[in-house]
Amino acid sequence: MNLKKFFLISIIGISLMNCTTEKQDDFKYVAEQFADLRIQRYKIDNFDKLTLQQKKLVYYLYQAALAGRDIIWDQNYKHNLYIRRTLEGIVKTYNGDRNEPQFAKFMEYTKRVWFSNGIHHHYSNKKFQPEFSKEYFANLVRGSDEWELPLQNNETTDDLINKLTPILFDPNVDPVKVNQDPNADLIKTSAVNFYEGVTQKEAEDFYNSLADPKDTRPVSYGLNSKLVKENGKIFERTWRYKGMYHLAIDKITYWLEKAMTVAENEQQKKALDLLVKYYVTGNLKLWDQYNIEWIKDTNSVVDVINGFIETYNDPLGYKANFESVVSFKDFEATKRIKTISDNAQWFEDNSPIMPEHKKQNVKGISAKVITVVVESGDASPSTPIGINLPNANWIRKEYGSKSVNLGNIVHSYNKASESSGLIEEFAYSQEEIERAKKYWALASDLHTDMHEVIGHASGQLNPGVGQPNETLKNYASVLEEARADLVALYFIMDPKLVDLGVMPSLEVGKAEYDGYIRNGLMTQLARVELGDDIEQAHMRNRQLVSGWVYEKGMNDNVIEKKVRDGKTFFVINDYRKLRDLFGELLREIQRIKSEGDYEAGKNLVENYGVKVDRELHAEVLERYKKLNIAPYAGFINPVLVPVMNGDEIIDVKIEYPEDFTEQMLYYAKEYSFLPTYN
């Protein structure tokens, strides 16, 4: 999921972002680091082993992915495209001194905006505060070519400056992208562009009126639309062809239709055809039909995720961000994850959750390790490392799901982390350090595999209970991630994994327990500003799980807090009892989801997942600072270049850009299909 350039934009088109092709042994995994961010690169091994038909398919899906890039910007904040195009106009054409310190601060701010697809941090959701002055910003705008600025309806450059200055510099203007405060109106206090003119209550009433509690196959109401109130009337603006985001969707469907002409088989073609029809009509029943047919396509080498997928950025959990991941199967690496999926029923049967919450017949969980070719939208530059789809509970129950581990993304992370010094700083004993170095990569892969394959796909709702976004509301995402993590944590210390041959011993499980507790109670705090609460769903989940088991195990000293030389450590004394505690918490969170117990879910999240120990937080930040590690990472995408013979593609080559700025400006030039305001 990531990207840049400074002077003549035409140079980008000629040099294609100064791309270089590198051999495996000298591949440069880390491109640059700034603020709290690290920009990495990933390789696409074995692309040359694909057939020409498969290469064409990948290329068309690659183009469809990038065609939707503008959508995520507009979804994240209604002024984001206006801001991005202003910043890019300055980067391309500013004729002043680019060597002065404030210009460096301007470039850092611009890169942060590019990385987060907007002016709010991709993880904390807080608005960035520029480290250059308002006056300097005005000078930058006035010193740039106004033809490269997104001037609207006879605006002047001064109008643009007056409009953007409070948006960028005033900390009280749209300060948070997604607000999670249960005491606030979550819509009015969130900057995301999913609602306009409506209150939280009006939105909830609108969607509650559509839901039928007796419908066992409900569509995902609100998934692909903006809810608007005009002249007292509330209605949806659907994201579809000839609807909202039409110009980008038109390009997406163009490339998807091209992909259909080179589909690997009829099942893949059928799924792509339904995806196109969904984009054209906006019909959510077609979205469900597409997902069902997509699940059935287990034979294709090439695969794609493309659509409005995850709802984390909607405080009410209805509306989804655009996302696309194009990939092909890593056959060798898939053996591990497939073994887990093949035994999904055993894991369900042996789960510590209540019998009535278990699936009696686990359906079609297909799993594989994939080689990512390109990511876009909500998946880029910051990317997941594992994905389990679709999200609709009834489809999972009746038809199953697809789980993937993003193999080459994980590999890049591993290569960048080899010599970080993080484990040595935060692990208490040499035994823990050595175990981590020996097993952490496998432990991490297994946790991801089980989180996605048997975590998200496990359990079932009680009859008549609404969907989690309806019952658990703003806590649904946190609790779902905690539930999936707990499934992985419970089983990673089970001898069954040794019997299956996916890990050599329970030492792998111990390494995962060490790392999870270390991260959940300490190291992830490096991603939070001192004094702030935890806002991001995955971070809340990890602290909730770690904090709960730490507290519940105190009497037995399961996890012990130790201080040595003024440094705090959390040391696991009893791995067996810790596993039992993970099982207890899993049982409770599954009950909360199955029964739709909002109050119990709220109490868990608010009591364990939100508040931070300030003294410990300050210590973590100080220790982390000395390591000079960026707590977040994202990726520059490779570039696919078709080799042409007239109008016919005869091959597709891969190039690996090294410059974030050049790729961002290249994308702005080649894939900017939406108007500034939509």
Image (cartoon, rainbow, N blue to C red):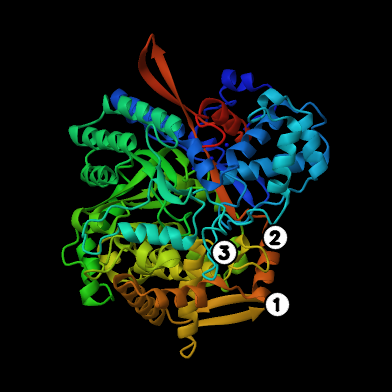
Is 247 placed left or right of 106 in the picture? Answer: left
What residue sits 66% from the left and 74% below the top? 614
Image marks 1 and 3: residues in contact by CB distance under 8 Å: no
Quarter-of-image position of residue 140 = top right
Where 46 falls versus 37 (above or below)? above
- The residue that label 3 is drawn on is 524
**Mark found first going from the N terminus, 1 or 2:** 1
What residue sits 32% from the left and 69% below the top? 491
Is 163 placed left or right of 370 in the picture? Answer: right
- The residue that label 1 is drawn on is 566
> Where is residue 166 drawn, in percent x and y?
72, 48
Where 141 falls versus 384 (above or below)? above
- The residue that label 2 is drawn on is 625
What residue sits 30% from the left and 54% below the top? 337
> Where is residue 415 drawn, in percent x and y?
52, 48
Where 34 falls versus 47 (above or below)? below
> Please, which residue is most extreme toward the top here?
646
- In terms of secondary structure, where does tag 2 sit? helix
Q: Is residue 439 visible?
A: no
How would you rate the neighbour count of disc 2 (Cα within 10 Å): few for under 14, some for 14-19, many for 20 or more?
few
**Mark found first going from the N terminus, 3 or 2:** 3
Q: Amino acid at mark 1?
A: Gly
**Mark found first going from the N terminus, 1 or 3:** 3
- In terms of secondary structure, where does tag 3 sit? helix
Q: Amino acid at mark 2?
A: Lys
> Where is residue 352 drawn, in percent x and y?
28, 76
